[in-house]
Structures are given as C-alpha cells and as structure tokens.
Image (cartoon, helix red, strand yellow):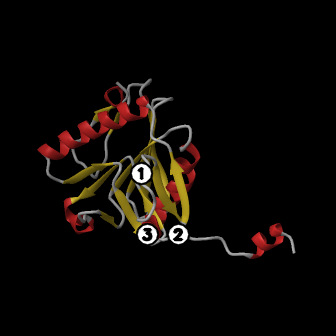
C-alpha cells in the first residue's frame, strides 16, 4: 500500500480550541475554521493604517454612545470548538456583553470587520463569510485597502448573508449600520 493510498483513507486531522491554545506565539495570525489551521503573516502597512483608522473612528463613536465594545486583533473569537478566529475588528453590543470573557469572545459578535490582504482575500471573502453567517454574526464588513471599497453583508431571515451595500471611496460613500445608530463614516476617513 502506498503512502498516497494511506493518506486517502486516513481521516484529516481536525484541531480544537484546546489544540489552538497550544500553538506557538510567533507573531502570525493563527485561526481554526472547521478544525483546519489557517495561518497568515502579519499585515502590511496599508492594512494596519486602515485598521487603526477604523478602530479609532468606531471607538470614538462607542465612547460617546455606549452601545457596546469594539475590539481589534489579536483577540480570539470562539464560535465553536473547531472555529476560532481573530477578526481585524469586531463589535459586541451591550445587550450581548455576556459573550465577552477575559481571554476571548465566546460566541458570535454583532459585527465583524475583516480587512483584506493578498494572502487573506479568498479566506475573508468566501470561507469566513460563510463561517460568520453560519454562526450568526449579524453584520460583516469586508474592507479592501487596495480598491478602497467596503462590502457590507447583513443576515437575512434565512440566516444567509445578503449584500446590503458595496461602497467606494471614489464615489464619496459613507458607511453606516443599524447596529450603531447615528454612525456615519466617510470612506475617505477609513482610507486616509
């Protein structure tokens, strides 16, 4: 029997949160999706700048309007024993504050924001979008620093995401969400 035949018959290894906690802290982002290990290098400068801009703008809003809490990576979100992610930014409403623990978020945040990098584009746009919808994340923003766009997905009654908006800095768009009433962020400020 060849090793190829053995590998086809062997079940694939599924990692759990317990395994995840043993991963080496090497400065890279480690995540589990359906028990599979995903690792990405640290983000580039443009990604970091956009992340800081958004974090500052959202934190400023939440400070004036105590609707919940904003967190940024690295901070674990444990969606299930085999689904542990570190979104770039997330919001947990005050009504769902029981999800927040000292070490992680235990459940689906109200809002998750992922900022695309070349190495994460497919994962963020396809795999994580399905993961977040499946676990009940109410709203998902995909921020593209290269195209200077933001795609906004919201959960429909069916549980699937519908694209609520596709916004662009070029057209002078502003992003808002019913989760944060009165919030209106010009994309020019996100991508400054």
> In which quarter of the view is residue 192 placed?
top left
Quick check: can you spot residue 159?
no
Residue 35 tag number: none
Contact check, label 3 and label 2, Cβ < 8 Å: no
The image shows residue 58 at horizontal and vertical percentages of: 25, 42
The image shows residue 89 at horizontal and vertical percentages of: 34, 47
Residue 17 tag number: 3
* Residue at 50%, 55% in the rendered image: 128
- The answer to which of marks 3 and 1 sits earlier in the sequence is 3
Q: CA gap, disc 2 to disc 1?
A: 25 Å
Quick check: can you spot residue 142?
yes
- Work out whether 91 lies above or below 17: above
The image shows residue 88 at horizontal and vertical percentages of: 38, 46
Contact check, label 2 and label 1, Cβ < 8 Å: no
Residue wearing tag 1: 140
* Residue at 82%, 67% in the rendered image: 4
Q: Secondary structure at mark 1?
A: strand
* Residue at 53%, 44% in the rendered image: 120
> In which quarter of the view is residue 182 placed?
top left
**Badge 1 local density, few (<14 within 10 Å), some, or many (20+)?**
many
Q: In the depicted view, which residue is nearer to us: 68 or 184?
A: 68
Contact check, label 3 and label 1, Cβ < 8 Å: no
Q: CA gap, disc 3 to disc 2?
A: 7 Å
Q: Nearer the viewer, mark 2 or mark 1?
A: 2
Q: Secondary structure at mark 2?
A: loop
Residue 15 tag number: 2
Q: Residue furthest right?
A: 1
């Amino acid at each position: 029997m060849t090793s190829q035949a053995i590998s086809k018959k062997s079940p694939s290894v599924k990692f759990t949160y317990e395994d995840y906690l043993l991963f080496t802290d090497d400065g890279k982002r480690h995540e589990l999706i359906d028990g599979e290990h995903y690792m990405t290098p640290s983000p580039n400068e443009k990604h970091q700048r956009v992340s800081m801009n958004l974090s500052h703008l959202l934190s400023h809003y939440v400070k004036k309007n105590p609707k919940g809490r904003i967190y940024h990576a690295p901070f674990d979100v444990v969606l299930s024993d085999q689904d542990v992610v570190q979104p770039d930014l997330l919001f947990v409403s005050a009504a769902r504050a029981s999800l927040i623990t000292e070490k992680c978020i235990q459940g689906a945040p109200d809002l998750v924001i992922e900022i695309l990098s070349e190495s994460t584009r497919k994962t963020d746009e396809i795999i994580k979008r399905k993961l977040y919808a499946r676990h009940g994340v109410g709203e998902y923003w995909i921020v593209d620093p290269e195209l200077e766009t933001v795609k906004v997905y919201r959960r429909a009654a069916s549980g699937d995401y519908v694209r609520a908006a596709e916004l662009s800095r070029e057209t002078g768009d502003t992003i808002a969400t019913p989760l944060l009433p009165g919030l209106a962020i010009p994309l020019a400020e996100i991508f400054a």
